[in-house]
Image (spheres, grey):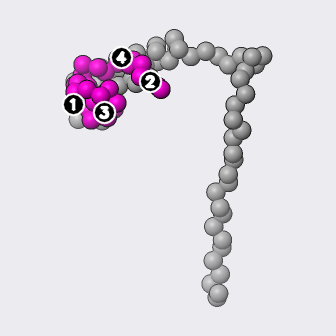
Amino acid sequence: MELIATQTLLERKVGITKVRGQAFYLKDFVLFPLLHPAAALHQGSMLEPLKEDFKKLREFLDRHSQPASTESATPTAPTLNIEPPQPAQMDLFS
């Protein structure tokens, strides 16, 4: 997540290196800022911190994920499967 997005969502000026790898519980969602993967391409020293961020994210998700129970599953909204339109074959003479 880039700096501007992090600052906007947290509603305060803060550096990404200070908040990366931490969970922020906001009103409607959890924000988990990470270093942008491209940072490791441009600066090799960012590779290890990036790996740490993804490890922390995995640990967070593992702690907060629960397998779906088949007995007490809450009903979900129906999904709408829409097939993309198929392009029509163009006729050379029409």
Q: Which mark is residue 43?
A: 1
Which residue is tagged 3?
8
Answer few, some or many: residues within 10 Å of disc 2's Cα (few below 14, many 20 plus, some between 14 and 19): few
Q: Position of residue 31 (x, y in %)?
A: 40, 24
Magenta part of the chain:
1-29
| Residue at the spot 75% in from the left edge and 17% down from the top edge | 72
Q: Secondary structure at mark 1?
A: loop
CA gap, disc 1 and disc 3: 25 Å
Which kind of residue does numbered mark 4 sit on?
Answer: Gln
Check if mark 4's residue and mark 2's residue have beta carbons within 8 Å: no
Which residue is tagged 2?
27
| Residue at the spot 24% in from the left edge and 19% down from the top edge | 18
Above or below 44: residue 87: below
Q: Residue 70 or 45: which is nearer the viewer?
A: 70
Q: Secondary structure at mark 2?
A: loop
In this rendering, which labeled residue sits more in front, label 4 or label 2?
A: 2
Q: Is residue 36 visible?
A: no
Q: Position of residue 53 (x, y in %)?
A: 36, 20
Q: Secondary structure at mark 4?
A: loop
Which kind of residue does numbered mark 1 sit on?
Answer: Gln
Which kind of residue does numbered mark 2 sit on?
Answer: Lys
CA gap, disc 4 and disc 1: 22 Å
In this rendering, which labeled residue sits more in front, label 1 or label 3?
A: 3
Which residue is tagged 4?
22
CA gap, disc 2 and disc 3: 14 Å
